[in-house]
């Protein structure tokens, strides 16, 4: 494993994620320079326009650094409208709200050396040491200017091109931290960043995909989409942190930190007063404060892509002044994306529910940004070829602001002699059909119908929704007839449509429709199993259902909330979360068709319930009294061996969990109870030899029936038998 510094110094086929403008290489020709300026302009337009990312931040910064270096080396090539001269290069959405003063940008530094140089330059400009600094988180959101008249919020505009922006007053009013009324009737302008917290982002994804729209790429695009959604009603929550105020009259000029502290008293949240904001007297203190932000950025619950360092005193700011693009009294310290190296074991090809075909890297486990990573996205096949990544290579894995790790390139000098280039698939690996390669993202030409047979069979299976009569043959027929492409379509089938199929009589069609209808009352755990959420099986589905209680609670839970469930680590949580977002349209359809979305006997989880439950010693968010719980409230470990009357093996395990226990497959000294039925073998003997409590299977069936009937006396009686 290597640190990011070492990693990028070797021969690589990618853009270095960490860039220092002073060390960046000029472009070799005026043509290449002009080309890159165009690329930057179009990426910036996408970025400021709020759409999905066209270029990641590190690549953007690397190109900007090279443009700056080129202009220093060949001033005669410099374009009059160079992105180094204008704020928001290529910003597309300008609008007609003219700013009271230009909304400037910030220059960047990328390491301690760059930071110290900036501070020395500021001291030199002032002719004396600066009188203190603020260090603030750099929020990864969208800049806005908010005007208050007599304490009332009257107009909010985006930055636009820095001179004028778009009116977003309506949507911005909903941002937490930007109050409708200030605590005093003041007339002033607050500037700051509108963003979406990680948890709100999760909610926004569910809402958006529920309406059939594609998911947002990133919390910033979600914030931008929500802020500018004039014709749509998005309830997705927004947040705001102010980083400057104009026109606040406190009698005499006050320090930036004092002005921001005053804004907090008026009800506006600020970056300076955030948990990681600091006021520093020396550069050493700044370095330490930046490090604190870098260390804590992963746990703030919102995207922070750097620190902003500003002279705190108004006199220092006035003396230092600004260029047309950025102030000289402030600088952004951009954090590098965490990059590590590991071995690319193989490249799998995945076919998504909509038929999108993507290469997925399977990696030797590596820690990146505090998380163990075993797989990473390779975006698309073109990208894979461009990055020149082969199985067996040592590759760079990066986790930037967001959670999904990506491969940025390979160490070509370490490529094994026997390595073989990856061959993209010629046909859909799932159905063998044609691939549509007209877009960057390849698709199976069957679209949603590809894989429909598989997912329907899984949905109907005995351990899932248990729909009798819906076997492979019928599934083939309804799919081929175009009647069904996802599980929710099953509920639209009627006798009239079914009898038209080969060898389907009216009686069997009627039975099938009734069986499908009956499955609407299956518990949430089975609905989840049936949906085939990646990285979950039957028992994980049960755990999720028992923890969250309802589909609503589960789909609004954030990645961190999911990790409260036993056996769900960061990687699995990210996958489950992404899967649920992906499944949102089908879930909505199922709900509309009356499919039950709750787990019987389990109280719905709400954010914060886990913490409360932990304090109370229960972990089910307040579930009712359960027979298979120990005195300390923890689940008993129960092994079911042999058959339980009326139940399959899976149903036996389900019953254990319904009764509050944890089902296990093997008997040990830690087992609390073994349920022994007909056909039990060595497990029963082992339980006996270990002195583990044994319950006959018929008693267990009675216990289950009594619990379901709410017959507490019988439950107590059965449990009382040693
Ligand atoms: S101060 C004149 N402080 O970063 C300087 N900006 O890359 C005004 N940003 O345009 C900016 N957090 O949109 C400042 N604590 C912070 C910030 C911050 C995020 C954004 C802002 C700015 C951009 C510059």
Image (cartoon, rainbow, N blue to C red):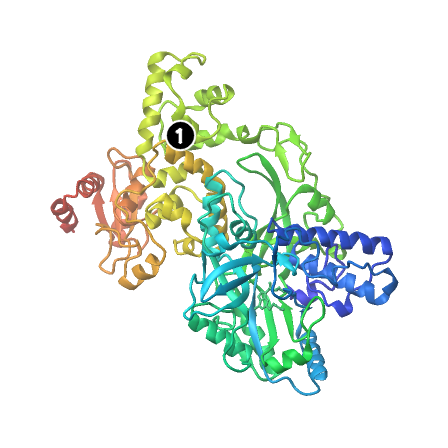
**Ligand 1's quadrant:** bottom right
Q: Position of residue 708 (x, y in %)?
A: 20, 41
Could you tell me which residue is drawn at 60 percent across and 67 percent down? 306
Q: Is mark 1 within 8 Å of ligand 1?
A: no
The quadrant where residue 244 appears? bottom right
Q: Position of residue 110 (x, y in %)?
A: 67, 69
Relative to the observer, which residue lies in front, 675 or 592?
592
Relative to the observer, which residue lies in front, 311 or 627?
311
Q: Position of residue 282 (x, y in %)?
A: 60, 84
Q: Is residue 495 above or below residue 393?
A: above
The quadrant where residue 589 appears? top left
Could you tell me which residue is drawn at 36 percent across and 56 percent down? 607
Q: How many marks?
A: 1
Could you tell me which residue is drawn at 61 percent across and 29 percent down? 445
Q: Position of residue 588 (x, y in %)?
A: 42, 37
Could you tell me which residue is drawn at 67 percent across and 81 percent down? 319
Position of 649 with respect to 456 (left or right) is left
Position of 229 with respect to 23 (left or right) is left
Q: Callout 1: few (<14), some (14-19), or many (20+) C-alpha neighbours within 10 Å? A: many
Q: Write down the residue under mark 1.
A: 460
SS assignment at label 1: helix
Any part of residue 69 in sight = yes
């Amino acid at each position: 494993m290597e640190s990011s510094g070492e990693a990028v110094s070797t021969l690589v086929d990618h853009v270095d994620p960490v860039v220092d403008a002073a060390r960046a290489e000029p472009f070799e020709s005026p043509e290449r320079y002009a080309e890159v300026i165009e690329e930057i302009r179009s990426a910036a337009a996408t970025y400021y326009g709020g759409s999905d990312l066209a270029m990641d931040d590190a690549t953007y910064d690397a190109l900007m650094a090279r443009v700056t270096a080129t202009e220093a080396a060949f001033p005669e090539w410099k374009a009059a409208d160079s992105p180094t001269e204008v704020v928001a290069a290529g910003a597309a959405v300008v609008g007609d709200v003219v700013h009271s003063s230009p909304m400037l940008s910030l220059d960047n530094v990328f390491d301690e050396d760059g930071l110290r140089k900036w501070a020395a330059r500021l001291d030199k400009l002032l002719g004396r040491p600066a009188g203190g600094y603020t260090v603030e988180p750099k929020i990864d959101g969208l800049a806005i200017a908010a005007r208050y008249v007599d304490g009332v919020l009257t107009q909010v505009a985006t930055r636009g091109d820095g001179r004028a922006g778009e009116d977003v007053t309506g949507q911005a009013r909903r941002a937490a931290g930007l109050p409708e009324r200030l605590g005093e009737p003041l007339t002033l302008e607050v500037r700051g960043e509108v963003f979406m917290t990680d948890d709100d982002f999760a909610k926004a994804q569910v809402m958006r995909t529920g309406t059939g729209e594609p998911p947002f790429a990133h919390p910033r695009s979600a914030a931008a989409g929500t802020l500018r959604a004039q014709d749509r009603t998005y309830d997705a929550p927004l947040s705001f942190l102010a980083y400057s105020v104009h026109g606040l009259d406190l009698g005499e000029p006050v320090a930036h930190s004092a002005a921001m502290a005053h804004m907090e008293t008026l009800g506006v949240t600020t970056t300076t007063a955030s948990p990681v904001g600091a006021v520093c007297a020396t550069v050493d203190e700044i370095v330490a404060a930046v490090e604190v932000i870098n260390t804590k950025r992963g746990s703030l619950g919102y995207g922070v892509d750097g620190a902003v360092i500003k002279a705190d005193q108004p006199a220092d700011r006035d003396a230092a002044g600004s260029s047309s693009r950025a102030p000289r009294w402030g600088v952004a310290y951009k954090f590098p994306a965490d990059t590590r190296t590991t071995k690319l074991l193989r490249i799998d090809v995945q076919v998504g529910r909509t038929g999108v075909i993507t290469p997925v890297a399977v990696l030797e486990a590596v820690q990146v940004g505090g998380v163990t990573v075993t797989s990473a996205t390779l975006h698309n096949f073109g990208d894979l070829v461009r990055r020149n990544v082969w199985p067996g290579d040592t590759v760079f894995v990066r986790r930037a602001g967001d959670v999904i790790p990506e491969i940025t390139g390979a160490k070509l000098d370490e490529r094994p002699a026997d390595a073989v280039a990856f061959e993209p698939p010629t046909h859909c690996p799932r159905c063998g059909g044609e691939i549509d390669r007209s877009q960057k993202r390849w698709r199976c030409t069957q679209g949603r119908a590809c894989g429909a047979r598989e997912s329907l069979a899984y949905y109907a299976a005995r351990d899932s929704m248990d729909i009798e009569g819906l076997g492979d043959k019928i599934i083939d027929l309804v799919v081929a007839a175009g009647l069904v492409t996802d599980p929710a379509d099953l509920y639209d089938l009627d006798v009239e449509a079914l009898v038209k199929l080969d060898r389907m009589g009216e009686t069997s069609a009627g039975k099938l429709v009734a069986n499908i209808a009956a499955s609407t009352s299956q518990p949430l755990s089975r609905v989840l199993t049936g949906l085939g959420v990646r990285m979950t099986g039957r028992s994980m589905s049960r755990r999720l259902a028992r923890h969250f209680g309802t589909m609503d609670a589960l789909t609004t839970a954030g990645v961190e909330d999911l990790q409260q469930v036993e056996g769900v680590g960061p990687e699995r949580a990210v996958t489950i979360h992404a899967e649920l977002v992906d499944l949102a349209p089908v879930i909505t359809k199922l709900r509309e068709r009356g499919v039950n979305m709750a787990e019987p006997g389990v109280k719905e989880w709400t954010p914060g319930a886990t913490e409360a439950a932990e304090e109370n010693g229960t972990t089910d968010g307040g579930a009712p009294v359960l027979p298979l719980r120990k005195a300390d409230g923890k689940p008993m470990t129960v092994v079911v061996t042999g058959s339980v009357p009326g139940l399959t093996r899976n149903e036996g395990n389900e019953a254990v969990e319904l009764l509050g226990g944890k089902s296990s497959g093997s008997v040990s000294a830690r087992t609390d109870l073994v349920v022994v039925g007909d056909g039990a073998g060595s497990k029963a003997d082992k339980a006996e030899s270990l002195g583990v409590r044994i319950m006959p299977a018929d008693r267990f069936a009675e216990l289950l029936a009594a619990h379901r009937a709410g017959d507490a006396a019988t439950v107590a009686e059965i449990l009382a038998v040693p």
